[in-house]
Structures are given as C-alpha cells and as structure tokens.
Amino acid sequence: MVVGICGGGQLARMLALAAHPMGIRTLVLDPAGDACAALVTKHLHGAFDDEALLDELADASDVVTYEFENVPLDSVRYLARKVPVYPPVSALEATQDRFGEKNLFRELGIETPGFTAVSSQPELESAIQEIGLPSVLKTRRMGYDGKGQLILKEAADVEGAWERLGGVPAILEAFVSFDREVSSIAVRSRDGEINVYPLSENLHGDGILKTATSKPHDPIKPLAQDYATRLLEHFDYVGVLALEFFQVGDRLLANEFAPRVHNSGHWTIEGAQTSQFENHLRAVAGLALGSTEPVEHTVMINCIGEIPPLDAVMKVRCAHLHDYAKAFKPGRKVGHITVRSSDPDYLKQVTADICNLQG
C-alpha cells in the first residue's frame, strides 16, 4: 500500500512516520526544497499544479490524501480522476471559504458566532451595525495561525480596516467572550465507522496554538462529538477531521473545521491507543480503525520559533520531543513536546516548566 500526500510539512512527516510500522509506504508532493517530510519519505519537488508531477504522484499511489486545506482544488480534482482521494474534495472545498463554511455549520444545526460577508469598506461599516463591536474581520480564503484577520474593538479600528486586510472578500464575525477553546478530533473509515478522541482543551497566543490538553471525561464531549459526526456524515467523509469550538457556558460555537490531521491532536501520538496519524492512514487505506481511548493524562506543547535545549527537555522524564527538522523562525511551529502522566498535578507542573524553557 502506497499513500501519496499533497504537502510535505510536519503533518506529512508525522503521517509518514506513522506509516512505516504498518508497512505502508508514502511519498509527498511539495514545492519547498526543504520540506521537512522529505527526510523521512520520498519527495516529489515541484508545484502543486505541475501535471507531470501530479501524474507521477497518482501513478505511484494507491490512494492520495493531503496535509493542509489550501492545496489547490483543481490539483486535487485532477488527482481524484486518476486515484482515490480522501478526505473527499467536497470537504476540502468547504474549508477554503470561511463564509461558505459558516453557512454549512448553520445548515447542519451547528451553532456559530454571528457572521456576515463583507466585500468593501461600506459593506464592513454596514456589517458593524449588524454584528456590533468588538468583532473579527477575516479573509474568506487562506489565512491560518492568526494570519488574515483583524480584531476590531472600537469605531476607530473600523476605518480603513477592509483595505488593511488586503481589500479582498472577507467575513465579519462577532467577537466571542469564550470560557475556553476546545476541539474534537474524529475519524471515519471507508465503511462508515466513526471513532472520536477525547476533547482537546486548547490555549492560544498570538493566534497560534500553544498547548492542547486531553480531556477524557469532559462533560461537553457528547455535544462536540454530535457536531463532528454531523460533518462526517454530511460529506461521507474518510479520514481524520478536526472541529474547533468556542465554549460559552453549555454551548459550543463552531469556529472552523480542518479536513486533515490537526495540531490539537498531536497529543494522541503518546496519549492515545492509536494516534490521529495512524488512524488517518488506516481510514484512507480502507483498514479497520484503531482505538481512540486515552492513555493517562496528556498535554502537547508547541515549540514556536525554536526548540528548547535538548538536555533540558530530556531531564523531564515524561517528556517526548518531536523535532520537525525545520529552520527556526519567529512564529513558526518547529516541533512539539508531549508530556504524559497518571498524576494530573505533576503534569501541570512539568507543562509549566517546559513552557518556561521557551521564554
């Protein structure tokens, strides 16, 4: 079995590493010469719209998947005419337009913050009358880790905001004073079996995920699981899907979903019976799913910009370092550290200690 992957970043790298013990081979297509997955699998180096490379990927693969949601739709459709592609193209398309994504949530009965489309500065000013302040202006397409968005707190912030965002189609969302941010990581097989991981409780800084904590007995998991299942069934989905929420009291407001393995699910490598990466591969390859049951209490800590000194990390006996072999750069995810323990108080302390190593 060979699984082709569009994209050669850290998610593709971890997919390739999870594939090896199962005897599954992988290869990636990525335009970056220094794609970090290239160190662990074959790398087709070139543009996503290079038909010769797409043909090579399709010819070499039994099935194709992707590791990020901004891969060109035309490229994925081209591949789908030659080889099975999972998750389905319809799910990928839905995530590439925030306005369409929010409307889909509404259609499926999944609660969201208030929102409206904005295509000009006058439309933004009218939208403010509907949504109010504070609010968040986001580009409809592209944007991740806090990029492509502006928080509008007062009237002065509104002036020229649409132009500052790039003068592109956008969406204005109500600002949510949430209790916490959580995500549901779920997986669906080709034959429709659905398994859901424990809820992840997420802490962000500057729009980037800092930590994700497994919450095995969280009382709001059934609602999150219901919402994730609605998406999976709607798309006749195959693979791992992540659905991110703002929790406000006993309500969950959907922020966005990702049709792929997800940063907030990295804790599953050490913290679950079967990691999200292995289960994604099982699903797209047509294999039975593995258990999503947790193993002890687990926290994932992102390494942003640089990785703490190796000797300091290794002194934490329950720490597991994942170095993505990426060049250090401010604001860039270059690795993560998972800590796992049966003692939640000890886990809280070592998580703080590791976070302090990063400054």
Image (spheres, rainbow, N blue to C red):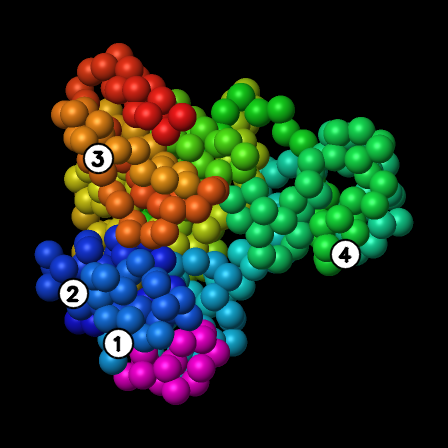
Q: Mark 2 points at which residue?
A: 24
Specify which label sits upstream in the sequence, 3 or 1. 1
Q: Is residue 158 left or right of residue 70?
A: right
Which span is picked out in magenta? 46-59
Q: Residues within 10 Å of mark 4 (few under 14, many from 20)?
A: some
**Res. 296 mark:** none
Percent x, y for residue 284?
Answer: 28, 63
Disc 4 element: loop
Foreground disc of the pair 3, 1 = 3
Specify which label sits upstream in the sequence, 2 or 4. 2
Disc 3 element: helix
Q: Is residue 50 magenta?
A: yes
Q: Residues within 10 Å of mark 1 (few under 14, many from 20)?
A: many
The image quadrant of residue 9 is bottom left
Main SS, magenta residues: helix
Q: Which residue is drawn at 37% across and 29% down?
A: 358
67 vs 321: above or below: below
Q: Which amino acid does label 4 sit on?
A: Gly
Q: Which amino acid does label 3 sit on?
A: Leu
Percent x, y for residue 187?
Answer: 32, 50
9 vs 27: above or below: above
Disc 2 element: loop
Q: Mark 4 points at which residue?
A: 167
Q: How far apart, in angstroms, are the residues tagged by discs 1 and 4? A: 40 Å
Q: Is residue 192 magenta?
A: no
Specify which label sits upstream in the sequence, 4 or 3. 4
Which quarter of the rendered picture does the C terminus lie within? top left
Asked whether the residues under the numbered discs 1 and 4 touch, taking CB atoms below 8 Å apart as contact, a structural biologist would say no
Percent x, y for residue 240?
Answer: 34, 52
Q: Residue at x 53, y 56 (%)?
A: 95
Specify which label sits upstream in the sequence, 2 or 1. 2
